[in-house]
Amino acid sequence: MKKVLWGKRELHLGVTVALFVFVLFTFLLSCNGTTATAQNQQKKKGDTTLQWLQQWKAGQEVSADAVRQFGVARCFAADTLTDAVFSRIWRKSYREGCTIARADLRYLRVLHVDGEGKTRTGEMICNRMIASDLVDIFRKLYEAHYPIQRMVLIDEYNADDETSMRANNSSCFNFRKVEGSKKLSKHARGMAVDINTLYNPCVKRMADGTLFVQPATGKPYINRNKQFPYKISKGDLLWRLFTSHGFKWGGSWQSLKDYQHFEK
Ligand SMILES: [Zn+2]
């Protein structure tokens, strides 16, 4: 009997193998496509964040690649205030009647790592007397991945301390008086820095025994025996860096406890 070359079984087998090869080929092609798309997206993201570094747009997440391309040393600097920067603070933190000369202020750009481990661009205005201290401190905090959530000019909050603190923003210069007094604050001369302000509130015991907490939303963080993110404690890296540069910590004061505050 003549043998049929392609019996039903062989035909089935042939079709199955062809289908398998086709599916495998399509799968490999799509994998390659996905990788290429991911790489493109990554590259695009890197390019965008490089622009943020070049223009120094504070508060942005930047990629490690962009930081490498831009150069980490250029991310930590103190400059005099450009017109563009000054126009952001005029009639806000630099109010009319401000007693500190514009020439005595410095604009700092630094990188910091937030609580989720993301690298962000930061900015701060301080007195020129402490500018190099702060650049050095923030560089070391960045290298140690010490978490700081947000560091943009207080003018982004219309120079309103309470609003800036509620946003857990870290800041320095603000021409203002000490809350509830006629005395100028050390912030008015750019000689005091507030860090991770929501989680490190300022707590004052009033004459009637009640507690006055700033920001008001910082009440859950007045018990310093509790553990929570962004908490500043005596002896931690932030405390050691600031005190070794000659700053005093408000958390050590007796009259009131200002856990966010370091001044010179
Ligand atoms: Zn302060």
Image (spheres, rainbow, N blue to C red):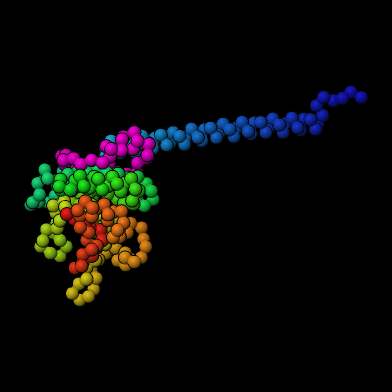
Can you give x and y, in whole percent of width and height, for residue 58 in the image? 27, 44
Q: Is residue 67 magenta?
A: yes
| Residue 207 in view of the camera | yes
Percent coordinates x, y for residue 230 in the rendering: 33, 56
Question: Residue placed at 28% from the left, 38% from the top?
Answer: 73
Residue at x-position 23% and y-position 73%: 210
Q: Residue furthest bottom?
A: 208
- The residue lying toward the viewer, choosing from 170 and 34, is 170
Q: Residue at x 38, y 48 (%)?
A: 117
Q: Residue furthest front?
A: 244
Left or right: 3 as drawn, with respect to 14: right
Q: Is residue 21 above or below residue 221?
A: above
Residue 112 in view: no
User: On the image, which quarter does residue 181 sit in?
Assistant: bottom left
Residue 98 located left or right of residue 71 = left
Number of marks in picture: 0
Splitting the image into 4 quarters, where does residue 104 fall? top left
Q: Residue at x 79, y 30 (%)?
A: 10
Tell me the quarter of the image containing the N terminus: top right
User: Residue 257: which quarter of the image?
Assistant: bottom left
Task: Depth check: give the residue in front, 104 or 44.
Answer: 104
User: In the image, is residue 59 above or below residue 46?
Assistant: below
Farthest residue, direction right: 1
The boundaries of the magenta stretch are 57-85
- Is 94 a magenta residue? no
| Image x and y of residue 55, in percent | 26, 37
Q: Point out the image quarter for the C terminus.
A: bottom left
